[in-house]
Image (cartoon, rainbow, N blue to C red):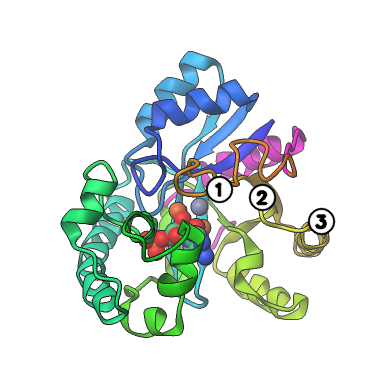
Amino acid sequence: MIDLHMHTSCSDGQFMPEETIRMAWEAGVTTAAVTDHDTTAGVAVAEKAAKHYGLQLFSGIEISTQGAAELHMLGYGIDPDDPKLLAFCRDFQVQRKARAVRMVAYLEQCGAPVTLEEVRQCNDGRCSGRPHFARTLVEKGFADSVQDAFARYLTTPEFYAHVERQKPLPENAIAVIRHAGGVAVLAHPYLLYLEQSQLDVLLTKLQASGLQGIEAYYSRHTPAQTQCYLRLAKQHGLIVTCGSDFHGPAVKPDIAIGTGICGNLCVESREIPEALSKKIAIARKTRGETAKF
Ligand code: AMP
Ligand code: FE
Ligand code: FE
Ligand code: ZN
């Protein structure tokens, strides 16, 4: 089984990178990628664990960008120590910390007061992302579930207008991924809520900046959506990837590693890692050169 989208405790996942890889192996995953939000901190440990269990592992990252509420760019095969990528990520950490302070003020206004200390306590000393706040909101009785906390407070128009951090342009995220020797793939396209024709236009634009793939297989895609993204990939000459977006049951209780939601993922195709490996090999070779995809 192939799962190229999972989060660890280095971002907002529940489990450490080595635990996540062990769980992937136990679930029957043979090819994996750890794709933490805006950090490569878990890649080295994940690589060690993958070697131990005999799993094929791609290095990875998921970068949140502007352009839509959730336009996320996956980067595969990146050098996790690339100085430009690390500087890019450091900037994100600063933005996240500042956003966390705004979130406290915003939630107080919403009548759901939480403190940074409470968020930390609820999340093993970590408090960087919205899922951490969501768990605290549930713990304090301000929401029924993580999903409910997102719907009520963390994906509202007010949140996006006044609280959300400044995010890079997708083109910049692609450039940084390519600079680090990686391949850029558009994550969970359904979250863009675009008509097929609009997505078509966006893909053309992003491809001109170096986008090379689309995450057609994803836990929350309907079969019709998957078919639509496979068609678009073919038309555009993009590779397709497959990811569960596993975070652990405390964060996304319905998503299982490798298998997705009630077994809707379970992708076995060897073509996916083979095509990705080929693109990564070219990306590594042409690293530093521009406009050569
Ligand atoms: P952040 O990077 O801190 O803004 O948080 C992004 C995380 O929040 C990602 O893991 C998303 O999958 C998660 N997320 C975004 N929207 C929702 C939602 N409606 N329900 C649950 N999780 C969400
Ligand atoms: Fe996440
Ligand atoms: Fe995402
Ligand atoms: Zn993700």
- Kindly identify the residue that appears in the image at 22 percent across and 50 percent down: 120
Instruction: Quote the CA–CA distance across marks 1 and 2.
Output: 7 Å
Check disc 2 and report the residue beneath it: 219
Q: Nearer the viewer, residue 171 or 38?
A: 38
Residue 245 visible (yes or no)? yes
Looking at marks 3 and 1 on the same chain, the residue that comes earlier in the sequence is marked by 3
Is 114 a magenta residue? no
The residue segment tinted magenta is: 265-293
Residue 289 visible (yes or no)? no
* Left or right relative to 106: residue 54: right
Callout 1 environment at 10 Å: few (<14), some (14 to 19), or many (20+)? many
Q: Secondary structure at mark 3?
A: helix
Q: Are dots 1 and 2 in contact, CB under 8 Å? A: yes
Callout 3 environment at 10 Å: few (<14), some (14 to 19), or many (20+)? few
Residue 223 marker: 3
The N terminus is located in which quarter? top right
- Residue type marked 2: Ser
- Residue type marked 3: Pro
Query: Residue 16: which quarter of the image?
Result: top left
